[in-house]
Image (cartoon, grey):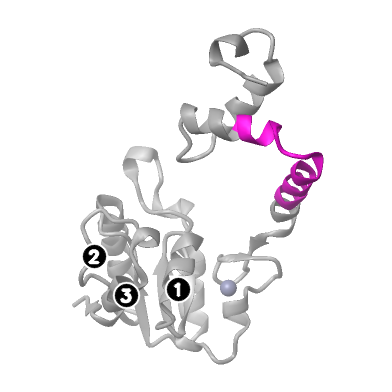
Amino acid sequence: MHLSFQSLNGFTRPLARLIDQFERLPGIGPRTAQRLALYLIRQPKEQIQALIQALQDAHTQVGQCQICFHLSVDTLCDICHNENRNSRLLCIVADSRDVIALERTREYKGRYHVLGGLISPMDGIGPELLQIKTLLARLEKNMIEEVILALAPSVEGDTTSLYLARLLKPLTKVSRIAYGLPVGSELEYVDPVTLSRALEGRRILE
Ligand SMILES: [Zn+2]
């Protein structure tokens, strides 16, 4: 069956709807959306069922850790659950993807706190929308020797780091990863070697 895009207009509404759904996803442009949709409608029924099931399961089963707000199936994530992790070292990240990137380095043995974004006045994201109150509560409740800010070297990352540094410095030692990270880079795209050097070379914020 040959499908040209001209022939799609009008009579293949389900396909257009599928393409539209893909286009809503981050990083997917119209061409990729069309490619994915055309690929999927040619796959066997079992494969489509497996995809639907996996999507549904992930969506219903994966929530947030009640302590660090990393993705978790249980109330507590594997990292918060792990007694061997250093609970006096807390690494602050914007997103769960950053936890995954830092875990890939296999260097970091402390715990995390996922903010759920970065301060961005342009997008209407203030500190109150991030997991900062819960962070302060953690610092009050637990003996934390150092907080490592592992936020992207971008305008939003700098703003958030500055805000947090001011807030946290009276409470504990605060450092920020910096070394070797290109400006504007998102943590999840930085290779593990560069990222572990950035972690090692973190600077204490005075
Ligand atoms: Zn956790």
Mark 3 vs mark 2, CA separation in Å: 11 Å
List the residue tagged with mark 1: 104
Viewer-closest of 24 and 160: 24
Above/below status of 8 relative to 139? above
Above/below status of 76 relative to 164? below
Q: Does 95 sit left or right of 175 as displayed?
A: right
Determine whether label 3 and label 2 are within 8 Å by CB.
Answer: no
Q: What amino acid does circle 3 point to?
A: Val
Above/below status of 7 relative to 2? above
List the residue tagged with mark 2: 181
List the residue tagged with mark 3: 193
Can residue 78 be seen here? yes
The crowd level at tag 3 (other Cα within 10 Å; few <14, some 14-19, many 20+) is few
Can residue 169 be seen here? no
Viewer-closest of 48 and 103: 48
Stretch of the chain drawn in magenta: 37-56
Residue extending furthest bottom?
Answer: 84
Ligand 1 within 8 Å of the CB at mark 1: no
